């Protein structure tokens, strides 16, 4: 019998699938928490006292639409990973939405703000990591769909 097919004739789901889907869910859960923290820094200047002073002007200059983009990217990523855990094919489209909104958000942060000027080149690390993870989750979900792991 083919190792990639179970006894009922369904594609066998590798353990790595569950690990990637689970880590993606946890990553996006942390992103939802980060959204909450960032939104509070932006809407409540008194909460910024724990931050270095160079962050204040960055939050003051952040346009409100960027928080909407941030919310959509995180929510779509979270729902998309739930879809992966449920083995649903709609997860692919939802993770695409997440990726597109992540790209808008992170590219604006890198090139439409004073982030790099205020904090230096190392400030680019996290936005690049976020974009890479969103891309990996999307392309992995497409692979899972192609292998018949999603229905």
Image (cartoon, rainbow, N blue to C red):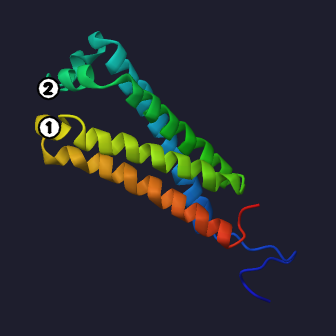
Q: How many residues crowd mark 1 within 10 Å: few (<14), some (14–19), many (20+)?
A: few
* In this picture, residue 89 sits left or right of residue 36: right
Precedes in sequence: disc 2 or disc 1: 2
Q: Residue at x 28, y 12 (%)?
A: 45
Q: Residue at x 46, y 53 (%)?
A: 134
Up-down: is 92 above or below 61?
below
- How far across and how far down the image is residue 4, in percent? 71, 80
- How far across and how far down the image is residue 125, in percent? 25, 50
* In this picture, residue 83 sits left or right of residue 62: right
Circles 2, 1 touching at the beta carbon (< 8 Å)? yes
Give the image quarter of residue 17: bottom right
Name the residue carrying label 1. 119
- How far across and how far down the image is residue 99, in percent? 48, 50
Give the image quarter of residue 115: top left
* In this picture, residue 69 sits left or right of residue 60: right
User: What quarter of the picture does the N terminus occupy?
Assistant: bottom right
Element class at badge 2: loop
Name the residue carrying label 2. 54
The reply to whether residue 33 is in sight is no
The reply to whether residue 116 is in sight is yes
User: What quarter of the picture does the C terminus occupy?
Assistant: bottom right
Residue 55's disc number:
none
Q: How many residues crowd mark 2 within 10 Å: few (<14), some (14–19), many (20+)?
A: few
């Amino acid at each position: 019998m083919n190792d990639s097919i179970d006894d009922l004739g369904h594609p066998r789901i590798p353990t790595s699938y569950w690990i990637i889907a689970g880590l993606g869910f946890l990553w996006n859960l942390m992103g939802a928490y980060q959204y909450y923290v960032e939104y509070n820094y932006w809407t409540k200047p008194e909460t910024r006292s724990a931050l270095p002073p160079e962050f204040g002007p960055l939050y003051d200059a952040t346009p409100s639409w960027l928080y909407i983009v941030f919310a959509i990217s995180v929510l779509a990523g979270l729902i998309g990973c739930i879809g992966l855990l449920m083995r649903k094919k709609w997860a692919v489209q939802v993770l695409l939405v997440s990726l597109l909104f992540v790209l808008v958000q992170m590219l604006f942060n890198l090139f439409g703000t004073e982030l790099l000027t205020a904090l230096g080149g190392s400030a680019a690390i996290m936005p690049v990591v976020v974009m890479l993870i969103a891309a990996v989750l999307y392309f992995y979900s497409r692979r899972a769909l192609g292998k018949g792991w999603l229905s």
